[in-house]
Amino acid sequence: MPAPALGDTRRMSQQNPDHRSRLREIARDAMLERGFSPEFEPEVLAEVEALRGELPAEGGAVRDLTHLPWFSIDNDESRDLDQVSVAEPLASGAVRILVGIADVDARARRGSATDSHARTNTTSVYTPGGVFSMLPERLSYDLTSLNEGEERLACVVAMEISSDGAMLGFDVYRAVVKNHARLTYGAVGDWLDGSGQAPEAIAALPEIAQQLRAQDEVARDLKQIRYENGALSLHSLEARPVFSGASLVDLRPERTNRAKELIENLMIAANGATARFLESRGVPSIRRVVREPARWRRIVELAASLGEELPAEPDSKALASFLGRRKAADPLRFPDLSLSIVKLMGPGEYAVEVPGQNSPGHFGLAAKDYTHSTAPNRRYPDLITQRLLKAALSGAPCPYTAEELAALARHCTLKENDASKVERRLKKSAAALVLSGRVGDTFDGIITGAAEKGTWVRILHPPVEGRVVRGANGLDVGDRVTVRLVDTDVERGFIDFAHQRA
């Protein structure tokens, strides 16, 4: 078959542009600007390549729990599987939930070249151009990933949950686990709510179906009791890039489902139990903190505009009740309200808690004790927590001083914020690609940010965010507006709108 002529090749390139590579290069440059290391140093790759495939020899008590029907649920494309779970009914009517978390520390030792790279970046960065993993793929996708059919070391958080969702007790120990079914959110969610057939793994393994039903019930009980305690029910729209080959063709809203909620609720419970376990052993920890909203007055104003009244001082239970009523009254626009509340609450942060001292807690989860522990392949704070847990279990000295933990908490907060900025920029670059042919069109939107640096709006279809460069005076978070697209810049991730005043 003859090679295509130059003109044919050029037309093919125009018809099927390589958006994915372009977005990856933009992401790489954005990461460098923020102080990330987007590529792994040669000594890191050499260190990981030298690792042997068999389970590393570990001292201390390690249980063999490979016989239990563990399974994982994650995104279709996820390859760094951090958690598996299993349920054990108890004679009392309670259920013991076991969450197995990949023992990443067993392969990425503190002080190693691999650990140094992870400590610099502190997180995997997820962009439409691809994932920039915190750890090399041979680790996060293979040796420390809880892949189906493979025996892996894990830290297990065991929680006894009553029939009404109360946590009666918890424990943490080390074990070898085996993932018996790698499941995905979409397929399991459709099966749980009755809109889809059972995935192949569920159909082939009846015990996995039983496990899913049992864990779903416990997760819903946990969710209910959290909401009764004042946890916030928020649902904002996230745009997922849709590719045809390497060409970006659309942005579609991510949808939540029961499978995602199942995992979310079990992981929240496991993170809370982990924080309390460390405290019970007299070990300091890095807590995940969301302080009381700095812009509570604006939240009160938003509620008043909807005919609702909130107290003058921050109150998570009152806010949770308000959100529950609004979700029931206007589910179509609830994501817009959720986004406004998220923006007004402000970002989370990492803070050290020394036993005997009180951290501010997590306002959004209405939780005093909360850490990050369930994603050590993707987040460095979770890897730190794992090392603290393993030291506590073995009776070894704490691997970090309080001063070291405080410095790490500050660094992890900074890099998480940097990662969020990179990810937002790349989402905007992807959106600019999709919208580049629609300059002059008008869109309905909601104001998501208003400060001296600028005013921001999220349009509804497609669900993307841009800057209001004309007519922004007087706009504030939560205002509903009509805007006209005036310009896009893919490289810089700029999407500029003009406010169309009535």
Image (cartoon, rainbow, N blue to C red):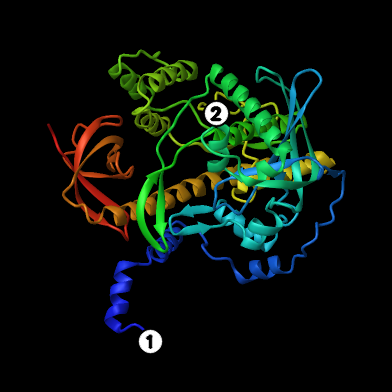
Q: Can residue 404 be seen?
A: no
Give the side of residue 46 with respect to residue 490, left or right. Answer: right
Extreme bottom residue here?
2
Tell me which amino acid carries mark 1. Pro
**Which mark lies nearer to you, 1 or 2?**
1
Q: Which residue is mark 1?
A: 2
Q: Residue at x 53, y 42 (%)?
A: 186
The picture places residue 293, in percent across and down from the top left corner, at 43, 27
Q: Can residue 424 be seen?
A: yes
Q: Quadrant of the C terminus?
A: top left
Give the side of residue 448 with respect to residue 388, left or right. Answer: left
Q: Which residue is mark 2?
A: 362
How far apart marks 1 and 2 lie (CA) works out to: 64 Å
Q: Quadrant of the N terminus?
A: bottom left
Helix, strand or loop under label 1 = loop
Q: Residue at x 21, y 52 (%)?
A: 438
The picture places residue 398, in percent across and down from the top left corner, at 76, 42
Tell me which corner region of the image, top left, top right, bottom left or bottom right, holds residue 70: top right
Tell me which corner region of the image, top left, top right, bottom left or bottom right, holds residue 322: top left
Tell me which amino acid carries mark 2. His
The picture places residue 334, in percent across and down from the top left corner, at 37, 27
Q: Residue at x 70, y 36 (%)?
A: 284
Decide: few, some or many residues near mark 2? Use Cα within 10 Å; few <14, some 14-19, many ≥20.
many
Q: Is residue 223 above or below residue 80?
A: above
Helix, strand or loop under label 2 = loop
Which residue is more in the foreground, 258 or 162? 258
The picture places residue 11, in percent across and down from the top left corner, at 28, 74
Q: Is residue 124 above or below residue 290?
A: below
Q: Residue at x 67, y 19 (%)?
A: 166
Tell me which label, 1 or 2, sits earlier in the chain. Answer: 1
Q: Which mark is residue 117?
A: none
